[in-house]
Amino acid sequence: MNKQATIIILIGLTVIFTSSIFHLTKNHKTMNNTAITSPETKDQEAIQSLMLTLFAATDNRDWNAVKNTMADSVYTDYSALGAEAGFATPEEIVSGWQAMLPGFERTVHQPHNFAIWVAGNRATATLDAIATHYLNGDYWTVFVGYDTEYIQENGDWKLARIDLSLYDQTGNQALPQQAMENVGNGNILELVEAKNTDPLEKFFTSLENQNLEEVLASLTDDVVQEMSFAPKDFPKSLNGIEAMRQQYSGVMDYTQQYEREYFGTADPNVVIAKFSGTITTSEGKPYNNSYVGIYTISEGGKIERFVEQFNPNILLSGWPGLQPETYSVHQAGAERGSGVEMQDVTFASNGVNLKGHLFLPPNFKSNQKYPTAIVTGSWTSVKEQMPDEYASLLAKEGFITLTFDFTGFGESEGQPRQVEDYQLKITDIKAAVDYLSSHQNVDTEQLSGLGVCASSGYMAHATAQDARIKQLVLVAPWLHNAEIARMIYDMRPGGTDGLLVAAQEAKQQYAETGEMEYVLAASELDPLSAMYVPENAFDYYLNPAKAAGAQYDNRFAVSSWEPWLTFDGISAAEEIDQPVFIVHSESGAVPQGAQAFYDQLKNSKDIVWLNDYNQQQLYFEPEAVEAAMSAVVDYLQPSSARQ
């Protein structure tokens, strides 16, 4: 094996040790900034509270409280904002923050949209935040995502890693430099309490009372509302009382409650508000967003200008008439306005209900049959990640496509959760074939299976076992056998044999107690995780700007090691009679496995190497995904003419 392939293997998957297997809570939780969705766990409450404390203490310049949230050594990556990444002590981190943040009149962080997973004394979480920095009548606001990890020390959770992804920013980007100069010159303004808050209280109370005239009465006639983070098809600004009337009259039948906190500036007529809304729209949908607003009060005691920053992704998902821009958690999926239609579907597999997405092509005709594909993703993935991405793009080209969550993953039923078992997943794929074969618009003579990464092996075996799959397409395939698996996992302490023992013990414990042992699926700090990916080497599953978030459960059932390590995805090649097309990269995962699989195919086959891209890029980067899809579409579109 060459050095490059070895490196790719190491960052793609890794091993846990036999001697240390952690027990996890049964379900991950998605949380907003005030509450945890049921069922609650003390660990998740503690972790969310820890982060709320960190940001509040930062805004209050309580540096001892900030340091108390951190482990002895913390990996920080603020490179998106120009800082260097690396390990540092809490003292070093706080010293760096003190060099800039106190140079602002006020900073206000609004963390929200938490998703937290706990594995014994390790945990990961993603969250979003609006962070406003105010100085001399001007502001700089960033909308960011955080990818974080935690360790438990003496019963207390501590922050061990924090990586920042910059989604967007607005305002005066020169303010940080001014703030640092203020600190350097000793020009640090004391924090002051908000004083002129009555107009804001009138505004929020009127919204809660659904009283449009009172809302407008809290504003000046020439009021201006700015919303620079607003997405497409939503106003960026409202100018004048009539524009406000038109906008706010549409929400007066929304049930609204706002938790709010006010912060003062050097100007008593400028108040910053941090607030979160609990709203039910006229359609009965929940809309719970988080905000930071900067309000300027007129001499007459009314709001004359306010800058309102909020999470645009929550707006797109919950506001009537709006929708997310793409059919994926990534930006590489087909645009919602492309004419592709997505339907939620349910079908059974071995007595378990699986949840899926059925994508219909533009200008879909109910009396027509279409070429069709089942699209599956990498190990531990859910349908909203690369499956929806590739499936929606293929639908855009005239195909019906189906994605779904495997048994025990995502929205699908099945216990225990997060078990990577090839037998279950192959059965699920064949159940998806059953479902599509009975669909009146599916051309069963043009039914393809498209597997991405680890599901390529499952899709290959399903194709070998089920002649109803007419073509097999593999993108960035992870294809291994027991020999390749041992070569990879024996490179870690504990080795393959240790993992197999651990899996057997986990299976026995589950049989006896109903409790499954879990480790984190991905971690940058924990070498016991299923995918140990230090220093952002492969952060796809952790980064909220890529694939992490509420839909993904960052856990791996320890019992999975036995089926994973003994699985042979390569051997299926000898049993496949259908045409096969592969798109991969020599910089991708286990390219030698894909080549071995290809070499053993005995019938029609083709392979394309996209060596400009690595494995992760083929998961989510638009340019890489488009290149792969272009090759796939070119292959599949003339399939009806190929015998």
Image: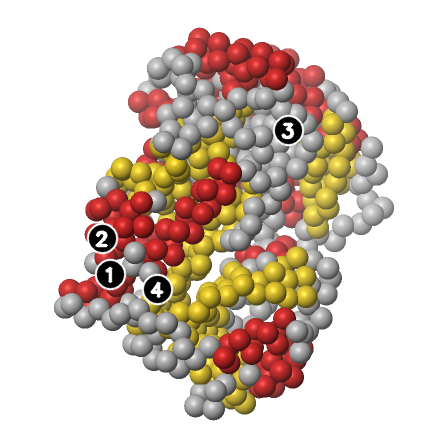
Dot 1 falls on a residue whose secondary structure is: loop
Q: Which mark is residue 107?
A: 4
Label 1 – label 3 distance at C-alpha = 47 Å
Nearer-the-camera pick, 262 or 556: 262
Label 1 – label 2 distance at C-alpha = 7 Å
Label 3 – label 2 distance at C-alpha = 44 Å
Mark toward the start of the polypeptide (3 vs 4): 4
Q: Which residue is mark 2?
A: 96
Residue at the extreme left of the image, as rendered: 185
Query: Comparing marks 3 and 4, which lies closer to the viewer?
Result: 4
Crowd band around label 2 with a 10 angstrom C-alpha radius: few (<14), some (14–19), many (20+): few
Label 3 – label 4 distance at C-alpha = 43 Å
The answer to whether mark 3 and mark 2 are in CB contact below 8 A is no
Q: Which residue is mark 3?
A: 408
Q: Which residue is mark 1?
A: 100
The answer to whether mark 1 and mark 2 are in CB contact below 8 A is yes
Label 4 – label 2 distance at C-alpha = 15 Å
